[in-house]
Image: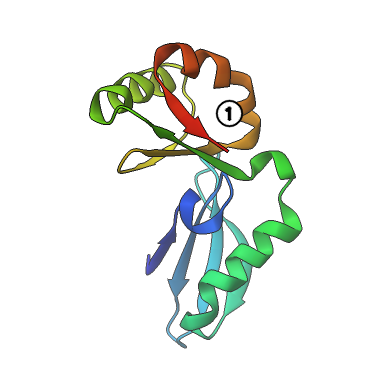
Amino acid sequence: MDYCFMRTDTGYDVMIIAVKNKEGIYRVYKVDPDQSEGIHLFNESDPNQLRSRIRKWCREHLPEEMEMVHFNAKNGRDDCIKIKHYLTDQNIPFELKQHTFFISKQRYSSVKDKIKNIAEIEDD
């Protein structure tokens, strides 16, 4: 694997990898946890275009519910730990960068009230 694009990279609740072949072309795959192999999406020869091309593919092919939203834990580390435990216990995929959580729009709408009961957050 040469590149791994996480949820915060794509802007969607999806992980994508790019693997460079012998000819120098990147084969781009969507990682599906339910399958042993990734789903081939497209090829890209220019590594500088990978990120923008992947974001474009996501916008054109993935439903709006998979779009990522973010919220911040206002009280720092303690609230982050509480929220992280809750999301992990509920098997909700997320990414955490400093005190900012990123989860899919669909999942956030279903757990927003519960998270607000657990910790003080700031969201859009």
Q: Quadrant of residue 68?
A: top right
Relative vertical location of residue 18 with respect to residue 5 in this rendering, above or below: below
Relative placement, left or right, of 86 versus 37 is left
Decide which of 12, 120 is in the foreground and name it.
Answer: 120
What residue is drawn where x is 30% and y is 43%? 98
Relative placement, left or right, of 56 versus 81 is right
Q: Amino acid at mark 1?
A: Tyr
Q: Residues within 10 Å of mark 1 (few under 14, many from 20)?
A: many
Q: Position of residue 41 (x, y in %)?
A: 64, 64
Relative vertical location of residue 105 with respect to residue 3 in this rendering, above or below: above
Q: Position of residue 17 (x, y in %)?
A: 47, 61
Name the outermost residue toward the left. 77
Image quarter in which the C terminus is found:
top right
Q: Quadrant of residue 2?
A: bottom left
Label 1, on which residue?
Answer: 108
Relative placement, left or right, of 114 versus 109 is left
What residue is drawn where x is 70% and y is 58%? 59
Image quarter in which the N terminus is found:
bottom left
Disc 1, SS: helix
